[in-house]
Image (tube, helix red, strand yellow):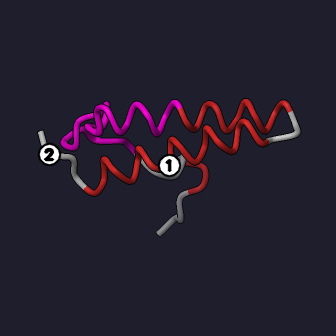
Amino acid sequence: MARTEQDEYFQRRAIQERVAAKLASDERAARSHSRMAERYGSMAEDPTPSGSADEDPGPVLKSEFRIIP
């Protein structure tokens, strides 16, 4: 199966995040980069979103923040 530009982007970002994790001097930053590398890597393998595009995500703003007409 041919890789799309999006797949290549996710793979490239996963590699960049792995490198950043190795170079990070702070343990928390390294963990964060590792997590991002995992996310990008999984998106490169299966770029389909977990939710359905037809699903209603619900209100963007909580009711207490809505503008009253």
Horizontal relation, residue 14 to residue 26: left or right: left
Q: Work out whether 42 lies above or below 63.
A: above
The residue lying at 18 percent from left, 42 percent from top is: 54
In this view of the protein, which residue sits in the foreground, 37 or 49?
Answer: 37
Give whichever of 61, 40 is nearer the camera.
Answer: 40
Determine which residue is flagged by label 1: 13
Instruction: Give the image location of residue 41, x and y in percent.
Output: 44, 34
Outermost residue, left side: 1
Q: Is residue 24 magenta?
A: no
Q: Main secondary structure of the magenta part?
A: loop
Identified at 24% across, 38% down, the residue is 55
Name the N-terminal-most of marks 2 and 1. 2
Mark 1: few/some/many CA within 10 Å (<14, 14-19, 20+): some
- Measured in 3D between alpha carbons, the distance from the residue under mark 2 to the one under mark 1, in whole angstroms, is 19 Å
Question: What residue appears at the point 11 percent right and 38 percent down from the top-left corner?
Answer: 1
Where's residue 46, x and y in %? Answer: 28, 32
Residue range corresponding to the magenta coloring: 38-58
Label 2, on which residue? 2
Query: What amino acid is found at the position of numbered circle 1 in the picture?
Result: Arg
Q: Which quarter of the picture shows residue 22?
A: top right
Asked if residue 57 is among those painted magenta in the image, a careful observer would answer yes
Considering depth in this image, is 22 or 33 the residue closer to the camera? Answer: 22
Which residue is drawn at the image coordinates 71% and 37% (left, top)? 21
Looking at the rendered structure, the kind of residue marked 2 is Ala
Residue 34 is tagged as: none
Residue placed most toward the observer, 61 or 3: 3
**Residue with the most extreme bottom position:** 69
**Label 2: how many Cα within 10 Å (few below 14, some 14–19, many 20+):** few
